Every structure is written in structure tokens, then in C-alpha cells.
Image (tube, rainbow, N blue to C red):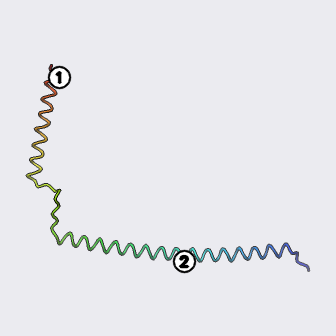
Amino acid sequence: MKISSNFKKYVLIGLLLFFVLLFVLFYCNSLMEGFQEGAETLDSAIAAADSKNSKKNSEEKLDAPNCFTNGQINNINLNLKAALDTLTKIKSESASK
């Protein structure tokens, strides 16, 4: 029984494609494992930094310069109310003219 040369070419091309596909699959699998390990390392680093920061924040009293005390907030509220009253007064005077 004689096998044609075209059939041999197709078999060789098929085998070549099969092995290339296997190589690509194993290579992609190893890449994905590497990415997964990197992501796990990054997650653990972020968790460690978060726990360190939360511990630091709970131990230290933070003095933020842009935080207002209650007295300052009350003064701001009074100033805003006075400004609103002045604007309403001006509006009513201009409407009556």
C-alpha cells in the first residue's frame, strides 16, 4: 500500500501544529501561575501595609491641620447664616424697588 506524499505532508503539518499548541498551552499555563503568584504576593504586601497603617493610626493621635473643632464649626455656621440673612435682605430690598 502506497501512501501519497500529500498525506505525509498533512500528517507532518498536523503533528507540528499539535506540538506547537502543546508548547503554547504549557507556556501560557506557566505564565498564568507566575501572574497568580505575583498577585498573591502583591495582595499579601497590601494586607501587611494596611494592617501596619491601621495599627499606626490606632496607636497615634492624628493631628490634621485642616480639621475644625466644634467651636470653629459653630462660628462658620453663624457666619454663613449671617451672610444668608444679608443676601435675603438685599434681595427683598431690590425686589421692592
Please name the residue that numbered disc 2 is placed on.
30
Q: Amino acid at mark 1?
A: Ala
Residue shown at 15% from the left, 19% from the top = 97
* Quadrant of the drawing holding the N terminus: bottom right
Q: Residue furthest front?
A: 65
Q: Give me the C-alpha separation between circle 1 and circle 2.
A: 77 Å
Residue 69 rendering spot, x and y as whole percentages: 11, 55
Q: Along the horizontal axis of the image, is 37 left or right of 85?
A: right
Task: Indicate the quadrant where residue 29 lies.
Answer: bottom right
In the depicted structure, whether residue 53 falls above or below residue 84 = below
Q: Secondary structure at mark 1?
A: helix
Res. 95 mark: 1
| Rendered image quadrant of residue 26 | bottom right
Mark closer to the chain start, 1 or 2? 2
> Where is residue 20 shown, x and y percent of the image?
67, 75
Is 97 in front, or is 1? Answer: 97
Q: What's the residue type where badge 2 is placed?
A: Ser
Where residue 8 appears, as percent x and y from the top left, is 83, 76
The answer to whether 43 appears left or right of 10 in the picture is left
Q: Kindly check if marks 1 and 2 are in contact, taking CB atoms under 8 A apart as contact.
A: no
Q: Is residue 96 above or below residue 50?
A: above
Callout 1: few (<14), some (14-19), or many (20+) C-alpha neighbours within 10 Å?
few
